[in-house]
Image: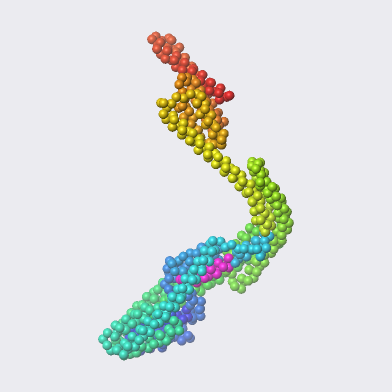
Amino acid sequence: MSETISDAVEPNASESTTEAPAQATAESPNTDENPAAPEMSTAGIIPKQEQTAAQQTLASNPDEANAAEANQEHPDEAHSDDYIPEIDYSTLPVPELKKQLIKAYKTSDPRKNARQIFEMYRQYELRLAAEKHEALDKFIADGGDSEDFEFHSSPENQEIEKGFQQFRDNRNRELKKEEEQKEKNLNRKNELLEQLRNLVDAAETKNSADKLKAIQSEWKAIGAVPTSDSQQLWNSYHALLDKFYNNRSIFFELKELDRKKNLQQKMQLVERAESLLQNPSINASLQELRHLHEEWKNIGPVPNESRDAIWERFIQASEKIHERKKEYLNVRKAQEQENLQRKLNVLEVIAPYQTFNSDRINDWRDKTDEIQKIKEQWDSIGLVPKENADEVNKRFWSSYKAFYQHKNAFFKQLDEQKMQNLRHKTELCEQAEALKDSTDWDETKERLIQLQKKWKTIGRVPDKYSDKIWNRFRAACNEFFDRKQNQQSLKEAEQERAASEKIAYYDKLASRLSHSATTIGSLEEFNTLLTEWRSFDEAGGRANPKLEERFFDLLQKYLDTVPDLSYERKNDLIFQLQLDRLRQHPDASHKLYQKEQNIRKEISSLENDISTLKTNIEFFARSKNAEKLREEYQQRIEEANTRMNILKKQLRVIRS
């Protein structure tokens, strides 16, 4: 920031008004070419002893000058939607830190957030290192050897590291392109210098001013050049402009007009600087202020009578912004003191854990959860004053590590128990291996299931044997169950074959009965068809309730082709078919019970109907001319009795 103030100061009012027109100074050098270039006249630089308090403050704070370093090539981007403000990322929880870092990668131009990304990634690496350390401690605490420890990064961590590598690669490519562009810019500016030299020799021509404006416009539009060439390039350009305007004193009025234009531009910069006081982000305000000072340097002189006033107004706005910076630092200092007190409180909470001891695993687990929550609370507290940071951190980690040392000592005592568990599981492996070749499928299955249940009741074994002993036990079990599965597959194939034959048998009978007019059946063939159908089930045919129902319907249709078959006999055969279908149902008992209840309900209903009909006949007996009605009711009673006798017979069949 000190560069900005010292380079942007206005010339003294004593500058002669007979100088060359201001057009020569309107095209000040690019910041990257000449970051310390003064105005056209060096007589206006204010000595340090005469600088205002704001100037000295800005000059003494190099951190302020570098606040916008990540955005120095695109200073306006500090206000874009993709801009990520700088905060204390060490206070962010790990999930939020990762979320912010991934979000930064996905902005339209991550380079403008380079400073933030590098800081977030540094914090991420610190957290990742702590996570690895914790995982190692836990691995060792669980009985593992540190040399066998492997840390598996999560997909989210891999995404972050891949994104950071891509960001660095893209950034390096962009920087390389910028250097190449600077060389092109240097070549073009050298060409413009040659044009300007030719123009100086023809300064009195009619259109020389227009040509100069064209050269100045293109010069200003061209970007940065290599730093090693910027000063010499600017000196040559500046000298040629001075020479041109000295040769063209007749254009003095043009300079005065240009000074007025410069005044308007600087007024706009002042207003923008004053508006920064309303910006809630102090870092964004400082970055924008640096940009404004850079723009100020690139604007030429203003009328002498306005120079001091406009400069004073601009520097006052700058001072106010830096006053806000001081206030911000004071607030942060107070926050650090508050954080220190909070961490001291946490130290009192964690202190008893360094002497904790127990002979119960659950106690250690509970205390581990508690101390991890305390650690999370510790991590969530922000920065403390630097002079206290080492002491409080040393006290915290001393208690934290003491707890885990005692925990490790406890779990080492459990190693013998793990070895005993290994011996028990080895015995189960031997039993399972003795059963793996058995063909007594059902009994062996149950025995292996019991072994598996017993396996689950045995505790952990040493980690280096865990996979090996489990794979041995599982291999023995799997060998038996694979053989059993193969046997089942053969059985299912046989069932599929029988089911296919069953369907073909049904289709053949259905095709035959489709010509029922020419088919003459018999009870012997009926029984043969039923017997052959049932033989498919004995051969292992798979049950198909819908096919069974369709077949029995087909048999009922077949009975219609049997000549001289009484109604009662046909009804008995149909009922028997219905019972056979119910008995083959998966829930046969329930289905038979429902059938029995339905028959009972129908019998009861018929008895009620008969009783009602008899009552009506007695009523008709007292009436004249009711003989026809009596005959009709008597017929209905006989039909009901016939039906009831059939139902009672069916009920006896179900019971038998």
Majority secondary structure of magenta residues: helix
524 vs 594, nearest the viewer: 524
Residue 270's image quarter? Answer: bottom left
Horizontal and vertical percent position of residue 446: 65, 43
Image quadrant where one finds the C terminus: top right
Horizontal and vertical percent position of residue 451: 67, 46
| 547 in the magenta segment | no
221 vs 47, nearest the viewer: 221
597 vs 496, nearest the viewer: 496
Q: Residue at x 64, y 63 (%)?
A: 149
What stretch of residues is rendered in magenta?
111-128
Q: Residue at x 50, y 23 (%)?
A: 523
Residue 510's image quarter? Answer: top left
Q: Residue at x 39, y 76 (%)?
A: 269
645 vs 346, nearest the viewer: 645
Residue 58 lies, with reference to residue 531, above or below; the image says below
Q: Residue at x 68, y 48 (%)?
A: 432
Residue 537 lies, with reference to residue 198, above or below; the image says above
| Residue 141 can be seen in this image | no
Horizontal and vertical percent position of residue 50: 46, 85
Q: How is the image coloured?
A: rainbow
| Residue 583 can be seen in this image | yes
| 124 in the magenta segment | yes
Residue 349 lies, with reference to residue 632, above or below; the image says below
